[in-house]
Image: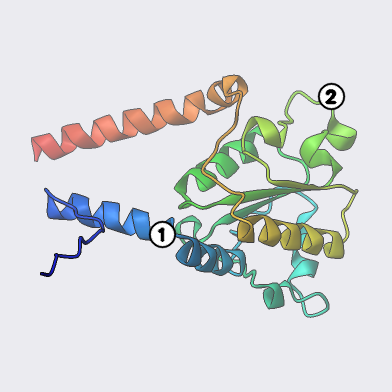
């Protein structure tokens, strides 16, 4: 007399697209695939071209032949939608803070932020200026690189530390914790965007 052997597994019932999304999410969270994903991300840290201040010279030196940060898997690129790393280079004025936030919002997850120089996180010599914004009020910073200016090899160390963090799976989507100053800073930009979209809707409706 034989008995049937019970089978165990997963079954997705219902909408095919929803089931495919659930299956993909389940697979990505499995250990081997998750480790492979994190390994790939760690060697694909592409900073967007966004020179905010004078530390941009150190950023340029980092990717020049002497230090050659591309060998670490990091390559500067032009478009926010094709990059996943923002390097804030020194002082961040209100004007550039708005630009940095808009660029960061266009970048796909996972995305990371490194702040270079004393001015980026304490204000430096401009600490009491009316026009200076602290990076942590605008973007969620992963690593700070001290110095005025920070040497290129110190920025390379920050890149390596970020790679280690990613490979350990210690990253998740996040944003600025206290958004009070961020809302105040970005309110005029968002209002102009809403007016622009509303005007385009009216023109499209007329046509």
* Horizontal and vertical percent position of residue 31: 49, 61
> Residue at the spot x=62%, y=38% of the render?
139
Compared with 202, 49 (above or below) is below
Lateral position of residue 201 relative to residue 32, left or right: left
**Residue 147 shows in this picture:** yes
Lateral position of residue 97 relative to residue 91, left or right: left
**What separation in Å lies between label 1 and label 2 (alpha carbons)?**
47 Å
In terms of depth relative to the viewer, which is nearer, 203 or 20?
20
Q: Earlier in the sequence, mark 1 or mark 2?
A: 1
Q: Secondary structure at mark 2?
A: loop
Compared with 167, 105 (above or below) is above
In terms of depth relative to the viewer, which is nearer, 101 or 158?
158
Residue 128 numbered tag: 2
Lateral position of residue 68 relative to residue 23, left or right: right
In terms of depth relative to the viewer, which is nearer, 126 or 113?
113
Asked where in the image residue 49 lies, by quadrant, the reply is bottom right
- Label 1 packing within 10 angstroms: few (<14), some (14-19), many (20+): some
* Horizontal and vertical percent position of residue 29: 43, 55
Lateral position of residue 195 relative to residue 79, left or right: left
Looking at the rendered image, the quarter that the C terminus falls into is top left
Residue 28 numbered tag: 1
> Residue at the spot x=64%, y=57% of the render?
168
* Horizontal and vertical percent position of residue 137: 66, 30
Q: Tags 1 and 2 in contact by the CB under 8 Å rule?
A: no
Looking at the rendered image, the quarter that the N terminus falls into is bottom left
> Residue at the spot x=62%, y=49% of the render?
170
Of tags 1 and 2, the one toward the viewer is 1
Q: Secondary structure at mark 1?
A: helix
């Amino acid at each position: 007399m034989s008995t049937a052997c019970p089978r165990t597994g997963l079954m997705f019932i219902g909408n095919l697209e929803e089931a495919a999304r659930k299956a993909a999410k389940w697979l990505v969270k499995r250990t081997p695939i998750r480790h492979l994903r994190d390994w790939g991300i760690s060697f694909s840290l592409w900073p967007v071209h966004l020179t905010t201040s004078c530390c941009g010279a150190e950023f340029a030196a980092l990717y020049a032949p002497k230090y050659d940060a591309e060998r670490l898997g990091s390559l500067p690129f032009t478009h926010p939608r094709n990059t996943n790393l923002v390097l804030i280079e020194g002082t961040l004025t209100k004007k550039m803070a708005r630009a940095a936030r808009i660029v960061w919002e266009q970048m796909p997850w996972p995305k990371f932020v490194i702040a270079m120089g004393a001015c980026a996180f304490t204000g430096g010599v401009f600490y009491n200026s009316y026009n200076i914004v602290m990076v942590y009020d605008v973007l969620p910073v992963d690593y700070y690189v001290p110095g005025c200016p920070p040497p290129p090899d110190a920025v390379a160390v920050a890149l390596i530390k970020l790679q280690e963090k990613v490979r350990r799976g210690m990253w998740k989507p996040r944003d600025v914790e206290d958004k009070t100053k961020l809302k105040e800073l970005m309110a005029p930009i968002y209002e102009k965007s809403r007016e622009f979209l509303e005007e385009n809707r009216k023109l499209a409706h007329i046509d």
